[in-house]
Image: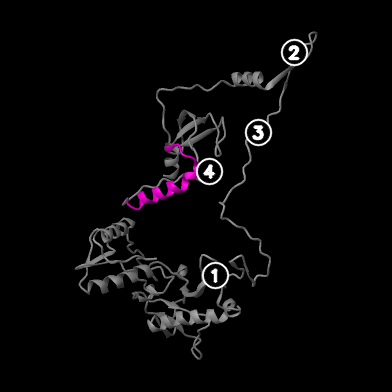
């Protein structure tokens, strides 16, 4: 949209910011939009993208046209054959392709110099072609700054109000316990375990014969602010659901998702009728889903019960990483909300209403 506005208005690329704001204004008021994705080789940011070609036939293995390129750009070269689906045909214009012999003769007449004397014959010495394309350095804007930082892996360097944290997030529980920020990791890991235990997610039991216990992994991340400083530490226990077997450990995995058009519609209604919008996040949402299948998991690293090392965790609630976790969470939410006299919208199954109250559930 930005490129089309600049092209048809005749403005320079320096007005891309105004065109971007206008495009955002239009898209935010449009319930639906169709997105056309171009191949990576044909993608550009700004500037004209059309090229003159001659239609020569149809593609054999795809629904596309075949074109002979008459002029080159950044993605295609002249005198090549390309296959495209997006094209505008000029029915009033017909251009023939020069024959190879004519092209050679034209090239000789244009790019050669005549040498010799009156007595001798005439010979043509071709001139060397040199590209006229000017090299242009890529610009990231006037506010872009690049700093080259030298330091150890575990060193934090701050310069010119920008803070660069060189240490990477720990990949395992052992790395977190060996980090110099171990007290932060311990705190968030303990909070995660407390939420799991408070929710009665599992009970310790013996592994039945013929069953295999799934493993688990600690996912440890640091959330960063825009200025490069640390916002918060986050830990999550994730079960290795990729080892589940369909028909044994899980059956259905689907879960409805709110449409973007529904969200825009509700925001528009709230703006028109001056309604109050309140957003909330359910912490460890998937832990609220009840499981119908019997799933066993090894005790998580760092929290193996002393004296019960041989036992495993029999899951009563869903856990992050399980194939059926989104479905079980939505089913639990649906049961609770409908039992409190909310009505389910038949067009979008993620919208619930009760008197002047509207609920929209959206997974993140």
Element assignment for label 3: loop
Magenta stretch contains residue 237:
no
Q: Is residue 126 left or right of residue 301?
A: right
Point out residue 173 in the picture as x, y percentages from the top left corner. Answer: 55, 77
Q: Mark 4 points at which residue?
A: 41
Q: Quadrant of residue 194?
A: bottom left
Sequence-first disc among 4 and 1: 4
- Which color scheme does this rendered protein use? one colour
The stretch of residues the image draws in magenta is 9-29
* Residue 67 x %, y %: 49, 31
Q: Name the residue under label 2.
A: 122
Compute the Cα span from label 1 to label 3: 47 Å
Q: Distance between the residues labelled 4 and 3?
A: 22 Å
Side of 118 relative to 139 (left or right)? right
Ranked by sequence position, the earlier of labels 2 and 4 is: 4
Query: How many other residues sit within 10 Å of disc 3, few (<14), some (14-19) or many (≥20)?
Result: few
Residue at label 1? Answer: 229
- Of tags 4 and 1, the one toward the viewer is 1
Is the Cβ of the residue at disc 2 closer than 8 Å to that at disc 1?
Answer: no
Mark 4 vs mark 3: in front:
3
Using the numbered discs, state the Cα–Cα distance from disc 2 to disc 1 in whole angstroms: 75 Å
Quarter of the image where the C terminus is located: bottom left
Residue lying farthest to the bottom in this orientation? 307
Measured Cα–Cα span from mark 4 to mark 1 = 37 Å
In this figure, which residue is indicated by the disc labeled 3?
131
| Mark positioned earlier in the residue sequence (4 or 3) | 4
**Which label is found at residue 55?**
none
Q: Nearer the viewer, residue 329 or 241?
A: 329
> Is 8 drawn above or below residue 316 in the view shown?
above
Badges 2 and 4: C-beta atoms under 8 Å apart? no
The front one of 284 and 139 is 139
């Amino acid at each position: 949209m930005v490129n089309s506005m600049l092209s048809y208005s005749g403005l320079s690329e320096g007005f891309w910011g105004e065109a971007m704001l206008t495009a955002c204004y239009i898209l935010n008021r449009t319930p639906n939009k169709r997105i056309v994705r171009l191949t990576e080789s044909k993608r550009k940011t700004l500037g004209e993208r059309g090229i003159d070609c001659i239609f020569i036939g149809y593609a054999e293995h795809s629904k596309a046209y075949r074109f002979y390129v008459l002029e080159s750009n950044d993605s295609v070269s002249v005198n090549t054959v390309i296959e495209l689906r997006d094209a505008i045909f000029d029915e009033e214009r017909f251009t023939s392709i020069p024959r190879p012999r004519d092209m050679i003769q034209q090239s000789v007449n244009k790019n050669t110099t005549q040498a010799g004397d009156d007595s001798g014959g005439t010979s043509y010495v071709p001139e060397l072609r040199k590209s006229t394309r000017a090299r242009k350095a890529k610009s990231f804007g006037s506010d872009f700054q690049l700093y080259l930082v030298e330091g150890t892996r575990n060193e934090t360097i701050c310069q010119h109000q920008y803070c660069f944290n060189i240490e990477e997030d720990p990949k395992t529980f052992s790395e977190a316990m060996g980090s110099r920020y171990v007290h932060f990791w311990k705190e968030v890991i303990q909070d995660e375990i407390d939420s799991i235990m408070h929710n009665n997610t599992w009970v310790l039991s013996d592994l039945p014969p013929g069953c295999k216990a799934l493993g688990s992994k600690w996912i440890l991340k640091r959330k960063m602010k825009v200025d490069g400083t640390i916002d918060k530490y986050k830990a999550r226990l994730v079960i290795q659901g990729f080892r589940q077997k369909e028909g044994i450990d899980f059956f259905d995995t689907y879960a409805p998702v709110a449409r973007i058009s529904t969200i825009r519609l509700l925001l528009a209604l709230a703006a028109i009728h001056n309604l109050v919008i309140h957003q909330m996040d359910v912490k460890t949402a998937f832990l609220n889903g009840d499981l119908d299948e019997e799933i066993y998991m090894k005790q998580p690293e760092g929290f193996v019960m002393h004296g019960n090392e041989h036992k495993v965790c029999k899951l009563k609630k869903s856990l992050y990483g399980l194939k059926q976790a989104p479905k079980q969470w939505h089913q639990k939410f649906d049961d609770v909300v409908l039992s409190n006299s909310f009505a389910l919208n038949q067009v979008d199954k993620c919208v619930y209403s009760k008197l002047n109250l509207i609920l929209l559930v959206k997974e993140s």
